[in-house]
Image (cartoon, rainbow, N blue to C red):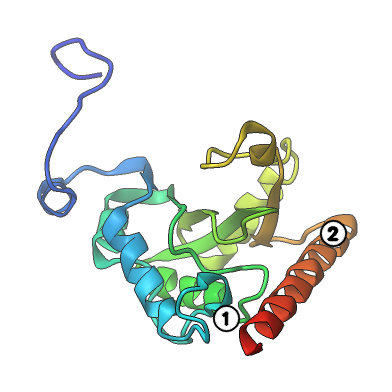
Amino acid sequence: PHPSGSALTYIVGDAAELVGSSDGRYDLVYVSSFHPDELRREGLQRRTSPGKEDFSLAIWPRGEEAYHPTLMSATRLVRDGGLAIFQHYRGGANVALDPHYLADVQWQFVAHGLSLLEVYAFAVSPRILLVVAIKGSLDDAAALSRVLSTRPAVKEFFGRHPGKWRKHAVRVFSAGSMPRSERTCLYGWRTVHKIRRALRKLVHRR
């Protein structure tokens, strides 16, 4: 609590300046839809899209850093063992199809002392993501994943979809092992999106 007695303190200002001036160590840093980050990610993918007007065909350019420098600077405020949660709606990579995006996320996180813990996407919109990382090693992530496996599964998260679609979240990455039934469902989900992508490519060739 703030010394004034208020439970929350609101700060209005530039995100980069706030990150640069803060010296706190927090249990959690949560960022939702940081627009410069989303526009940067979208721009990188549009360069790879065979149909410039159809962003659905875009694939993440391998080896690029997934997150804006301001977001990665914010992760230094997380204490060891704390969490960084990034949620984004626009310009996300299609994790149902992309073969290397999450590997690039992990590479960037490790360079900042983080390890990818879990990633969720909407079943109907695999570019809308909820990405969770722990401030720690890959072993730390695996250990926490085992703890989380005993908790209720994440079935929905906030997003810009009508209510019922928010109840169809798919876990696309876990630092630990996923149950066989969940892996089977994930395979089927990815197959459906691959078929949809193939059909869109046919439309663009006409």
Task: Judge whether residue 84 can be spotted in this image.
Answer: yes
Q: What element carries label 2?
A: helix
- Residue drawn at 72 percent across, 37 percent down: 151
Residue density around tag 1, few if under 14, some if 14–19, many if 20 or more, within 10 Å:
some
Q: Nearer the viewer, residue 24 or 40?
A: 40
Q: Residue 169 carries which label?
A: none
Q: Which of 146 and 37 is in front in this view?
A: 37
- Pinpoint residue 49: horizontal percent, then vertical percent: 49, 83
- How far apart are the two marked residues, 2 and 1, measured between alpha carbons? 20 Å
Task: Judge whether residue 140 can be spotted in this image.
Answer: no
Please, is residue 34 above or below residue 156 in the view?
A: below
Left or right of 178, for residue 89: left
- Pinpoint residue 107: horizontal percent, then vertical percent: 46, 77
Residue extending farthest to the front is: 206
Residue density around tag 2, few if under 14, some if 14–19, many if 20 or more, within 10 Å:
few
- Residue drawn at 20 percent across, 24 percent down: 9
Please, is residue 25 above or below residue 204 in the view?
A: above
- Pinpoint residue 165: horizontal percent, then vertical percent: 67, 41
Q: What element carries label 1?
A: loop
Quarter of the image containing the C terminus? bottom right
Q: What residue type is labelled 1?
A: His
Q: Which of 109 and 181 is in front in this view?
A: 181
Residue designated by label 1: 100
- Of the two numbered discs 2 and 1 on the same chain, state the one appearing first in sequence: 1
- Residue drawn at 22 percent across, 13 percent down: 6
